[in-house]
Image (cartoon, rainbow, N blue to C red):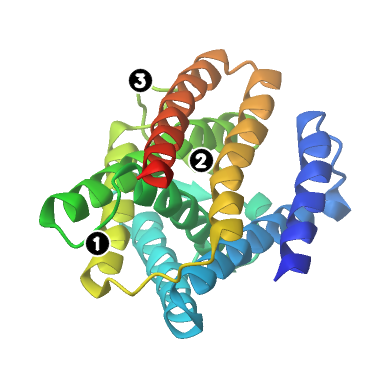
Amino acid sequence: MNLIYRFFIFWYICGVFLLTFDLIPPWLEWANSVFLIAAGIVSGLYFISLYGRRFGILYSLWIIVASIWIEHLGVEYDFLFGAYQYTDNFGLKLFNTPITIGFAWLLIMGCSHELARVITRLSNTIVSKIMFIIIGGLLAVTMDLILDPVSFKVKEYWLWEEPGLYYDIPFSNFVGWMVVASALHLSFVLVSPTKHTQVELWENRLALVYGLIIVMFCIIAISGGLWLASALVIVLSVLWYSLYFLRRSRHEES
């Protein structure tokens, strides 16, 4: 488990440098897929560490399969997100949808899960669970506010076929992200597995990964002239992290 996390960190460092300065040659395009798959696996290991092997594996597979299917519906029928198409720059496709998109969603769900879990002090109360679902969805949308402009405008991983006010991205996309992320968080709440106690290492890792992904895409966004997206997401991320560490410190003191 530690080896996979270290590999992800190594690949991340290489990726920041290569993507920022657009140094990836055509024969190395597969590196993007390897990065997303490794990141998704790290998120899956987080779920396994916190909730056990059985639930962690099943929940991770559920996220991968469900997200690929929903994205497929989006590509084929403009479902939920709007009209868009993936280019060939995003790896091997299944039903016109990149397989790596499932691992990308797994990464997003793991990161948003960790921050939302602490911010809401997730418990058995109805209010806590509702807040976890909503904030988990908002944390995912925060990531997409930088992922989508970079992937569309700078890297052209996918192409939007209808206009929008935010970097020509339709508002329906962000609504779709909120719906999908919240629904996946809801599926977790419905099961509510028992959390293991001694897992602080993986909690810290996923809290860090959330920031690492945002930093990487903000750097690429700035290099591509997407200043508004970078500024907006940095401000929102500072807010989320402030809430996260405030709630975490209060929990440790109690």
Q: Could you say which disc has been placed on residue 165 in the image?
A: 3
Identify which amino acid the numbered label 3 is placed on: Leu
Q: Earlier in the sequence, mark 3 or mark 2?
A: 2
Looking at the image, can residue 29 be seen?
no
The residue at 24%/45% (across/down) is 134
Residue 159: give its label.
Answer: 2
Q: Nearer the viewer, residue 158 or 222?
A: 222
| Residue 158 in the image, given as x and y percentages of width and height | 54, 44
Q: Residue furthest bottom?
A: 54
Category of crowding for the residue at label 3, using alpha-carbon neighbours closer than 10 angstroms: few (below 14), some (14–19), many (at least 20): few
Evaluate if marks 3 and 1 touch, with contact meaning CB atoms under 8 Å apart.
no
Seen at 26% across and 75% down, the residue is: 191
Q: Secondary structure at mark 3?
A: loop
Callout 2: helix, strand or loop? Answer: strand
Residue sitting at the far left: 126
Instruction: Determine whether label 3 and label 2 are within 8 Å by CB.
Output: no
Kind of residue at disc 1: Leu
| Crowd around label 2: few <14 · some 14–19 · many ≥20 (10 Å) | some
User: From the image, which quarter does the N terminus lie in?
Assistant: bottom right
Residue 124 image position (x, y, % from top left): 19, 63
- Mark 1 closeness class: few <14, some 14–19, many ≥20 residues within 10 Å: some
- On screen, residue 134 above or below 67: above
Disc with the residue nearer the chain's start (3 vs 1): 3
- Quarter of the image where the C terminus is located: top left
The image quarter containing residue 37 is: bottom right
Looking at the rendered structure, the kind of residue marked 2 is Leu
